[in-house]
Amino acid sequence: MTLAVILALLAGGVPAAVLTGLPRWAADQPSAVWLAPGPDASADRGGSTRTGADGADPSVARHLGEALAAQLDRQAAALLGGDRAGFLAVADRAAQADLGRRFAALRALRVTVWQAVPEGSPTPVSGRPGQWRQPVVVRYCLVVPDCAPSPVLVATRWRAGGPAPLLLAIEESRAAPAGVRPWEVSELVGAVGARTVVATTPALRRALPDLLAAAEEAATVADRYVIGGPPPDRYRVFYAGPAEWRRWYGGGRPSWTAGYAVGVGGGHHEIVLNADALPATGPGELLRHELTHAASLTDRGHPSRQTWWLVEGLAEYAGADGAPVRRYEALDDVRRLVAGGWNGRLDALAPTGTAPAGRVGGSYGVGYLAVHHLVDRYGEQQVLDFFRAVVHDRQSADEAADRVFGDDWGSLHADCVGYVRSASA
């Protein structure tokens, strides 16, 4: 199986990323010994050597795969034990600078689980005798040792022929759902609280204390909006400078985005804040918004753009944290959207990536007001039940409203739109 096929299959089996955001205004084991088998070790009864489709002797690949697995186990034990020299010992000298940075970043994040398992068999690198490629699935936990690990698939390259294979390179993960993680490509410093772990680059280190305090406060709010399970063991927050914003998790966010949450598997989301786009009031509202996504969404994200209003409306409602509607920052944007020809459909609110900031702000605001109206009428718990039915269970709004609220969705939708128009007038 080729690396491309393995990547595609794994990507298909991992939930899709959740990309959400606010407008700029808002929001030690012994080393294994590996010896190549002797000349007759893989001969069949006719005396010929069996080879795979890629020309590799299956027996050689099998023995090498076992040796690679042993090296990965050794490295994992070193990482969890804080043994930097042991972590680097499995690698060629040329790869050790990159590995040393990864080691430091993962230790800064308080890595507690690191399981690196070969996916399939190694394959020889064309034109580079003695070099082999090996896809590796890494599963990791941060801070909490008994979490459901988050998986990431990486491609590795090794050199065989010595006492043990040596790691030559680790490629950045580019497969769905999440793309490259911060600890793969950046130096990181971190801080840990009772409910959150926050991290950034050394250049932004001074932001960590305030960021951690704001994240801890936001977590107490987000925990109220947990749906379908226990609260996240720790909310994971990354604070990105300009270069990191363009690179982490694939970059490419709409220009109006100040933050987003991305599903990374294992029931976890990782949150990124754009250091250059935080509101003057600080990160509190944005953190409440994004942490609420992590609390309320599954790894699968939300079903479609038609449910965007509910997903973002709930996060905006949490972000407002009980403030009066009249103090909601985007009311003017809502007013302009309503007066500018909005068709009055909640399921048509989702902005495009190139939408102007005012249009984006108005869309978020309409979602917020609609959710606010539903909470006023039915209470938070019933709204969360409605959210679960629509977003988690993929029920239609008509079916969910009838089951949860005991009311017709058409009438409720009209009431929500009427409230939006009156509250923004």
Image (spheres, rainbow, N blue to C red):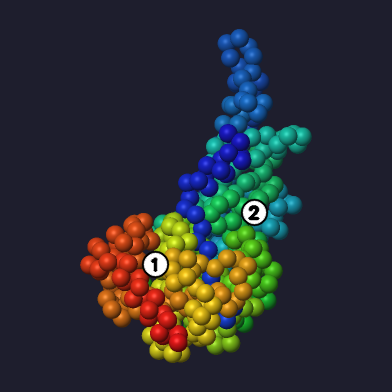
Mark 2 closeness class: few <14, some 14–19, many ≥20 residues within 10 Å? some
Q: Residue furthest top?
A: 46
Please indicate, yes or no, whether residue 44 appears anywhere in the rendered image: yes
The amino acid on which the numbered mark 2 sits, given as a three-letter code, is Glu
Q: Amino acid at mark 1?
A: Ser
Neighbor class of circle 1 (other Cα within 10 Å; few <14, some 14-19, many 20+) is many
Q: Secondary structure at mark 2?
A: loop
Who's the residue at 71% across and 52% down the image? 95
Extreme residue in the left direction = 406
Query: Nearest the camera: 34 or 149?
Result: 149
Residue 38, horizontal then vertical, whole percent = 64, 23
Quadrant of the snapshot with the C terminus: bottom left
Sequence-first tag of 2 and 1: 2
Q: Residue furthest right?
A: 127
Residue 37 at least partly seen? no
Give residue 260's quadrant in the image. bottom right
Front residue of 83/55: it is 55
* Left or right of residue 423: residue 171: right
| Residue at which label 1 appears | 296
Side (left or right) of 286 relative to 4: left
Residue 360 versus residue 253 in the image, above or below: below
State the mark number for residue 172.
2
In this image, 100 relative to 260: left or right? right
